[in-house]
Amino acid sequence: MRKTVLIWECNETFGTEFLELFVHDANIYVDSTVIRIDGNRPYKVNDSLVLGQDWTVKQLDLEIQNLKKSLHLLSDGKGRWFNEKGEEIYPLRGAADLDLSCTPFTNSLPINRLPWQRNDARDLETGFGVEKSETKVSVARRGSGKKEVPLQKRQF
C-alpha cells in the first residue's frame, strides 16, 4: 500500500482540504475533509471515494457535517449511478466522473483515467455535486474551452 497526503488551500474564500490517498492492489481509496465558508456560512465536508486502479469512481460517501446532509453514490463504472437503496439515478446516466465543487481533487479523475497526449482537449460529462453547501447532484458537461496550460498527468 502507498499513501499520499495532499493539502489544498482555496484562494477564492476561506477554505482548506486535507486529503489522504491510499493505493492498494485492487482499489484506490481517498479520504478527505474540506472546511470552507460559503458566503457567511461555514461548512465541513467529509468525503470518501473508492476508485478502481484505472481511476474509475466506484463509490462516493459524502457528509456535510454541520448541515446534517449526506450523499451515497455507487457506480458500475459504465456511466450508471445508484443511490444507497440501489436505485439508479437516471439523470446521471452516462456521466463517467464526479466533480465535487468543494475539492480540486475530483478534477484529477479524468486526467488520470483517460489517455492524454500533449495539448489534448476533451469534453467530459460529469456528475456535479456539493455546490453552495448542497448535496444535490446533477449532470454537467465540462467543455475543454481554451486551454492555456497543457495537462500533465501526475502519478501518485
Image (tube, helix red, strand yellow):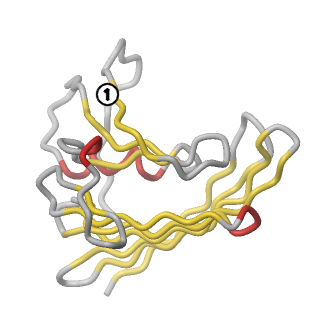
Residue plotted at (61% across, 61% down) = 7
Q: Position of residue 103 (x, y in %)?
A: 55, 50
Label total for image:
1
Q: Residue 48 versus residue 90: which sits nearer the camera?
A: 90
Locate residue 103 relative to residue 79 in the image: left or right: right
Q: Is residue 84 above or below residue 37?
A: below
Q: Quarter of the image for the C terminus: give it.
A: bottom left
Q: Is residue 33 above or below residue 104?
A: below
Q: Position of residue 113 (x, y in %)?
A: 20, 51
Q: Position of residue 138 (x, y in %)?
A: 40, 40
Residue plotted at (21% across, 59% down) = 56
Residue beneath label 1, please? 141
Q: Is residue 123 above or below residue 96?
A: above
**Helix, strand or loop for disc 1:** strand
Amino acid carrying mark 1 in the image = Arg
Q: Quarter of the image for the N terminus: give it.
A: bottom left
Instruction: Work out which residue is located at the far top of the displayed protein and give it.
Output: 146
Q: Residue 121 versus residue 77: which sits nearer the camera?
A: 77
Residue plotted at (30% across, 59% down) = 155
Instruction: Work out which residue is located at the far bottom of the displayed protein and give it.
Output: 1
Q: Is residue 152 above or below residue 45?
A: above
Label 1, residues with CA under 10 Å away: few <14, some 14-19, many ≥20: few
Q: Position of residue 55 (x, y in %)?
A: 24, 60
Locate residue 102 relative to residue 2 in the image: left or right: right
Q: Residue 150 versus residue 28: which sits nearer the camera?
A: 28
Locate residue 71 relative to residue 39 in the image: left or right: left
Picture quarter containing residue 107?
top left
Residue plotted at (34% across, 27% down) = 142
